[in-house]
Image (cartoon, rainbow, N blue to C red):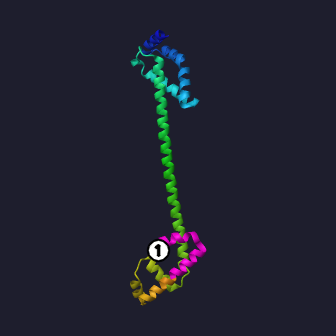
Amino acid sequence: METQDEFLLDALSQGSHSAFEQLYDRYSRRIYANLIRLVRSEAIAEELLQDVFMKVWELRATLNTGQSFQSFLFQISGNLAIDFYRKSARRQTMEAAKKLIEESAYDHIEKYINFKEAEILLDRAISALPPQRQRIFRLCRIEGKSYEEVAELFSLTRNTVKDHMTKANRFLREILSQEYGPFLVLLAVAFSF
C-alpha cells in the first residue's frame, strides 16, 4: 500500500486529479472518523475534512513521498481541529465581551432614565413649595448661589435665607420619601439635601 501511495503522491505532485481522487477515496473515511472524534460534530468534521484535502492539493508539489501519507493527513486534521477550537474560543470571548459592553450600555441608559425621572420628580416637589421659598431653593441648590448672594438679591437676611432652605429641605425630604421612596436616595445624592 505504501508503494501505491508513493506512486499516487508522485502523480499528485504533477497535478493529477485522478491520483488526488484515489487518495481521497482511500483516506477520507478514516480522517473523517478522526475529525468527528476530535470536534464531536459531523457538520464541522465534514468542513474540516474538505479543508484537509484542500491543504493536500495546495501542498501537492512539496509532499514528502517518503513520509506516511496517512500520518501526514492525521497531522493536518489535528492541526485544523486545534485551529477550530482556538477560533471557537476567540469567538466566545468576543461574544462575551460584546454582551458585557451591551449590558453596560443598557445599565448606563437605565441609570440615565432613572436620573431623568428623579429630576422630574424633584422639580414637581420643588414646584409645591411656596413661591418665595421655591425661588430661594432654586437659586441656592440648583444655581449654586451662596446664602449671602440670595439674601442680597431679595433684600433678606442670611438667616432668613437659611430658614427658607431648612424648611424647603425638610419639606422635600418628607414629600419625596412619602410619595417616591426609592428615588429619594438618588435625589439626595444628586442634589445633596
> Does the magenta segment cover residue 99?
no
Answer yes or no: is residue 46 visible: no
Q: Residue at x 54, y 65 (%)?
A: 114
Q: Mostly what secondary structure, the magenta segment? A: helix
Instruction: Specify start and end residues of the magenta stretch as a single range.
Output: 168-192
Residue type, mark 1 in image: Ser
Q: Residue at x 56, y 75 (%)?
A: 176
Up-down relation of residue 49 to residue 176 (above or below): above
Image quadrant in which you'd find residue 68: top left
Q: Residue at x 46, y 32 (%)?
A: 83
Up-down relation of residue 108 to residue 126 (above or below): above
Whole-percent x, y for residue 69 in the image: 46, 17
Q: Secondary structure at mark 1?
A: loop
Whole-percent x, y for residue 167 in the image: 51, 84
Q: Which residue is mark 1?
A: 192
Answer yes or no: is residue 177 visible: yes
Q: Residue at x 56, y 81 (%)?
A: 128
**For mark 1, does the 10 Å Cα neighbourhood hold few (<14), some (14 to 19), or many (20 or more) residues?**
few
